[in-house]
Image (tube, grey):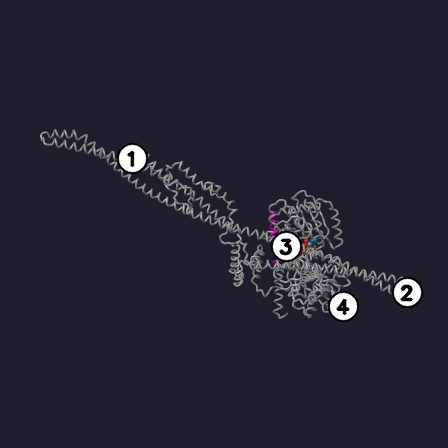
Amino acid sequence: MAMKLSTLFLSQGLSGLNSKPYNGRLPLSSSYRLFPASCKMRQRNLSSPHKRQQLKKASHEPLTNGDFDPNSDSASTASVPILNQESMSKDEVPNSITTEHDDAKDLSDVLLLNQARVRALEDLEKILAEKESLQGEINTLEMRLAETDARIKVATQEKIHVELLGDQLQQLRNELTPKDSGESQNNRLNEQVSLPHESGMTNLTMELDSLRSENLSLKNDIEKLKQELCHVKRTDERVIMLEDERASLESALKDLESKLSVSQEDVSKLSTLKVEYKNLVEKVENLQVLLDKATKQADQAITVLQQNQELRKKVDKLEESLEEVNVYKLSSEKMQQYNDLMQQKIKLMEDRLQRSDEDIHSYVQLYQESVQEFQDTLNSLKEESKKRALDEPVDDMPWEFWSRLLLMVDGWLLEKKISTNDAKLLREMVWKRDGRICNAYMACKEKNEREALPTFLRLTSSPTSPGLYVIHIAAEMAPVAKVGGLGDVVTGLSKSLQKRGHLVEIVLPKYDCMQYDQIRDLRVLDTVVESYFDGRLYKNKVWVGTVEGLPVYFIEPLHPDKFFWRGQLYGEHDDFKRFSFFSRAALELLLQAGKKPDIIHCHDWQTAFVAPLYWDLYAPKGLNSARICFTCHNFEYQGIAPASELASCGLDVDQLNRPDRMQDNSAHDRVNPIKGAVVFSNIVTTVSPTYAQEVRTAEGGRGLHSTLNFHSKKFAGILNGIDTDAWNPATDDFLKVQYSANDLQGKAENKEALRRMLRLSSAGVRKPLVGSITRLVPQKGVHLIRHAIYRTLELGGQFVLLGSSPVPHIQREFEGIASQFQNHDDIRLILKYDESLSHSIYSASDMFIIPSIFEPCGLTQMIAMRYGSIPIARKTGGLHDSVFDVDDDTIPLRFRNGFTFLTPDEQGVNNALERAFNYYRNNPESWQQLVQNVMTLDFSWDSSASLYEELYSKAVARAKAAGRP
Ligand SMILES: Nc1ncnc2c1ncn2[C@@H]1O[C@H](COP(=O)(O)OP(=O)(O)O)[C@@H](O)[C@H]1O
């Protein structure tokens, strides 16, 4: 019976489980801990393995529909690629191009969702297991209850039986009671009958009691079971809740999927935009080709023009001879014939001249038309893109970017670095996602806060003050007319000032030996400027063109001495005459063009005449809006000449050859153009702070220290920058392979390419290559350069020198060394000026040596660093301000960038060179880190240009305050 009941209960328990079959839907929940970990039923095991398998199978089913597998460890990761492909939806910005940031957000949403699903599935499994074991326990208890019931029934029947026996006994007693005499017998009989009956009763009562107590405990158990059943009920309710949650998560997933499809549409829109952009680029390229063609035609026109001129000369000569012929004409019949012949020839020539004139005209017209066409299209493209950039908010930056910007602006306001008004304007720009503030941020990304602030503040400055009008008058400008650093500075500083919103123009001599292919739209103006020299007026042709995006005026003097028709920039016997002429002609041009610059900036002794000429002659004539800034790039070259020579350009010798004006400090009959510029300029600068200190000492000042000390208030040293657009290994077209700090493989390839090109040995990739690019003049420490060549060889490195010397004996000496190493595996000397090769050497070399005796600024160390070549430099002037020794503990680690030495002798060179070689060989990883560091240092013109800007603005403000024009 008991067995049957237990079987019955067991089957009921299982069918109870079966009555709620698992339907294959996976409940999801965000609350993962539905059951306490201490749930006691977990220990008991009455679950059916078969059922569990069924459950598992059911829970796997959705996987086959491409859903998520909670049992797989790799489930979450396995789903990632699928999500990556599809998770481009963007729920925040409908109808706009999805950003990577949104993609990442969606991706993380879906991942979270999936993780929640996995956890919910795990919980569900646990719940089901708990439910099963609970069910099992109920079954056991029900079985026990049934057994107890059966036993109670038996006991009850036995009790009834005993009671019956009791009644019969009582009856027997009653029958025996009437006979008193027989009482004792009765009692004995009673004792005999009741003894077995009494003991049976006691047993029964005890059994009954035990059954009662068992019954009670069973009741308690039943009570407990009821409570647990309640638990199960609640669990079921939770399961239902989980299912609901799962349904809602599924609908969220669907939502995300629909958003994903929207974003995919956006992506397709983006690719259409890209195609449009490509088309535009192609158009611009076509226009470029058109322009190149037109330029070629113009070149042809110029050639024809030159031929024309030659023809004209021939015609002139013929005319001269015709005149001569005319003298003899009357006396000779033959002569008459000859004359006729000549006339015919002249006619012929004139016809040809006429034709070529027409040709030129049509070429020029064609050229001008195509230039115009190009300009128009370019302008409209620029306008269009400008409009787009300014009007439309920048959509392709993540919100995080704008928020960061906003916080940055707020930070500046709170730290009192900007005014409330500026902060308000900047905040508004961020709010509108204005392209200008985005550009400003991009431009300042790698700058520190002090450098970045002026860029942002310029955005808020009033549009009524667009900037300063600066005109440079100089003898050099890179890359068209460059001998050394001066050319780089004029271009680099001008470009940077232009970028900062100033109007910058440059006036240069029109040398015959310029890099004409670097000038765009060169044309001669249909006018001449007459300027005074040596007691009369000379005509000057004025050419205009753009160089590196800067407007440049080229002055071509029509002087019989052909001042700039010499095949070189400097080094002529009449340099004083040439450049004093040019200085005056340049000011004449500004005057006649009615220009009103704020600043006229002249450079070095060649254009130092501008300062006294301006104040003595041109300000009185009306060219009086400007302050004069003079920069001396090297005090070694002062252009000293006999005082009388000053008169040629119209300056008053008596007035100027005085100790407080232009008179040279060591020769009273000579004038010093540099001294004149120091005296007559409003601002005087040189090219590094250390050099500015050095030239104020007797050893460094080259005779001008007293003048500089006297004018120290207007004298400052500003470290030059480099043109980081022109000197950029990531975009440099001269390089075989472009590269950057993050990808140095290209640098290694350039090294290999240079070795091949110069026929150097390629054995040993880790053989250090030392470079040197320099004018070979005593200032540069030529004897130390020579020593470094031999020492490098001894140390097992390679050495490449690119340089030339204006000093004949130095040039000869180096030619000797060059031929000594002509076919050497590790040494090569190239004794010429070669811009393209210089780029290759900067990129290929591991180290770069600059052992200067003095160095006003020096650009090569900065260029070398930009190309990942570690400088080995003597601590002097600008080198002292830009190269900091790797082993110098007084310098913060992040600023250390090279190897330096103080004493300009062989020992100094040896020490620095050996330390560099050891570092390179023994710490390749640190070396690579050093290379990457120096490549990211900021040597751009930005900070230096802002210092110039400051000096300019102060000078202009002072003039305004003093009521000057
Ligand atoms: N032989 C050469 N070929 C090409 N570029 C050269 C040569 N010599 C010097 N340069 C370039 O001239 C500039 C030198 O500037 P800098 O270091 O200031 O010296 P400096 O102005 O005294 O000559 C650098 O741009 C350097 O690359």
User: Tag 4's secondary structure?
Assistant: strand
Q: Which residue is mark 3?
A: 283
Q: Spatial distance from mark 2 to mark 3, Cα to Cα?
A: 70 Å
Q: Judge from the rendering whether residue 722 lies leftward or rightward of residue 269; answer left or right.
A: right
Q: Foreground mark, 3 or 1?
A: 3
User: Tag 2's secondary structure?
Assistant: loop
Image quadrant where residue 647 sits: bottom right
Which span is picked out in magenta?
928-943
Q: Which residue is mark 4?
A: 536
- Disc marking residue 229: none
The location of residue 135, given as percent across then percent down, is: 35, 39
Indicate which disc, 2 or 3, sits on the residue closer to the N terminus.
Answer: 3
Nearest to the observer: residue 81 or residue 720: 81
What amino acid type should be assigned to the residue bearing mark 4?
Arg
Indicate which disc, 4 or 2, sits on the residue closer to the N terminus.
Answer: 2
Kindly indicate whether the residue at mark 2 contacts the one at mark 4 (C-beta within 8 angstroms). no
